[in-house]
Amino acid sequence: MTNPDLFNTTTERDVITVSQLNRRAKQLLETHMPLLWVEGELSNVSIPSSGHWYFTLKDNEAQVRCAMFRNRNVTVRFKPEQGQHVLIRARVSLYEGRGDYQIIAEHMEEAGAGALQRAFDELKLKLASEGLFDEHIKKPLPTIPKHIAVITSPTGAAIRDILNVLERRFPSIPVTIIPVAVQGKESAPQIVKAIALANRAQLSVNQLSVKKLPDEKLLGEKLFDVIVLTRGGGSLEDLWPFNEEIVARAIYASELPIVSAVGHEIDFTIADFVADMRAATPSAAAELITPDGDEWLDKFIGFEILLEEAIARKLQHLQQKLHWLRSRLRHPKQKLEQQAQLLDTLELRLKNTAQKILTAYRNHLNNLVIRQKPLHPQLRLQQLQTRLQQAQQNLNKVQQFTLAQNQQKFNAAVRMLNTLSPLKTLDRGYAIVTAVDSPIPITSSSQINIGDALNTRVAEGEFVCRVETVLRK
């Protein structure tokens, strides 16, 4: 909107100075003329020590003075020369000191196809002929990256887009930003150094402790497993560092897979062709290198359900096996009764045997006595008494040996009985639970109710507890 003070149409005389006039004219030009593209031929090119460029842009019918200040001309990749045909993006202004109408150039490139485009096409053809674009050499991306290196400007919109997508899809993946300039003369060397740095980076002791990785053999492994090379959109001049040959060869030499996400969807750079994967935008790059966290969560939930079902089946199988073993397990009382019966049988056999032996010796002795009665030889009698004593000693030895054998069998039976005793089971941490008023063991949760008092016998002592919760199958 025009300032009403610029032109006064009243009859009252409004006198202004020349400086004020030029200033108002400059305001009008800079306010109402947008940034525009102008094509023409360079003449009267002047480059003083200040680094600013001053020149005239002309065609066959007119000319205009131009200035391009140092902070803008540093991005121009050629030195302006007399008679050179160029295309500049500029804003219209006025030099107040002389009242000269001029344009201030913001960007300059060669007119027509442009030197940059020609250089792009030539490098693309060269690298393609060397096989740098071949699909069979492209490295696959990791299914789930363990650590992502992002080479970009830390203040650009591209890194914000990438971090937002990663936070939404898979926030647990660590990201390291390797800051570089993404335009200008210093950009390409910085990108090359950043790619080399990402390939050299290794896991440290601190990172092992943070990640809770106990295997120190992992020391020396690469820290990153994928690189994202990215920046936002811009002109061909702005994106030129990603068309540099040194950048292309650094990408080709990288051991880690590289995803190129430079510019907008319509922008293509040499880096896109050499990289292992090209993404249309930085956000698309983040989508490519990360899985969908929600899908993985659904998978884990499914695995959890399968695991619970497998555990339930295993527990059911073990429960059935326990019931089968319990049915085969004989009560210790029965075993004691059998051992007692066997002991009685052995005792009877021992007594019978001893009685038979004694009876036999008595019979023999009686026979001898009968045979010796007519003779009454005192010596023979003494001999027979000696034999009788020996026989009694032998009998005692037989009895002691028989008793010792039976005692050993009895002790073995007692040890076996102790092994099978439920009291031994209590020593291993088990307990016998019965109702306070009943000696019958409780074997099922269906036999108890909340509030019941239970007597619990352990290896050393007993205690009474009360039921607060019952878990039934």
Image (tube, grey):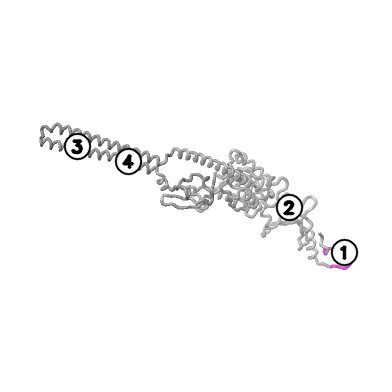
Q: Earlier in the sequence, mark 3 or mark 1?
A: 1
Q: Say what amino acid the circle numbered 3 marks.
A: Ala
Tell me the number on the disc at residue 256: none
Q: In the picture, which quadrant includes the N terminus? A: bottom right
Q: Earlier in the sequence, mark 2 or mark 3?
A: 2
On screen, residue 341 versus residue 450, left or right, reads left
Q: Main secondary structure of the magenta part?
A: loop
User: Which element type, helix, strand or loop, lies under badge 2?
Assistant: strand
Relative image position of residue 191 (x, y in whole percent): 60, 50
Q: Earlier in the sequence, mark 4 or mark 3?
A: 3
> Of the residues tagged 2 and 1, which is closer to the observer?
1
Crowd rating for badge 2 (residues with CA inside 10 Å; few <14, some 14–19, many 20+): some
Crowd rating for badge 3 (residues with CA inside 10 Å; few <14, some 14–19, many 20+): some
**Residues at badges 4 and 1 in contact (C-beta under 8 Å)?**
no
Magenta-colored stretch includes residue 332: no
Relative image position of residue 212 (x, y in whole percent): 51, 51
Crowd rating for badge 1 (residues with CA inside 10 Å; few <14, some 14–19, many 20+): few
> Of the residues tagged 4 and 3, which is closer to the observer?
3
Residue identified by numbered label 1:
9
**Residues at badges 4 and 3 in contact (C-beta under 8 Å)?**
no
Q: Earlier in the sequence, mark 4 or mark 1?
A: 1
Q: Say what amino acid the circle numbered 1 marks.
A: Thr
Q: Earlier in the sequence, mark 2 or mark 1?
A: 1
User: Which element type, helix, strand or loop, lies under badge 1?
Assistant: loop
Residue 360 image-quadrant placement? top left
Magenta residues, start to end: 5-14
Q: In the picture, which quadrant includes the C terminus? A: top right
Tell me the number on the disc at residue 410: 4
* Residue 216 in view in this figure: no
Viewer-proximal residue, 289 or 370? 370
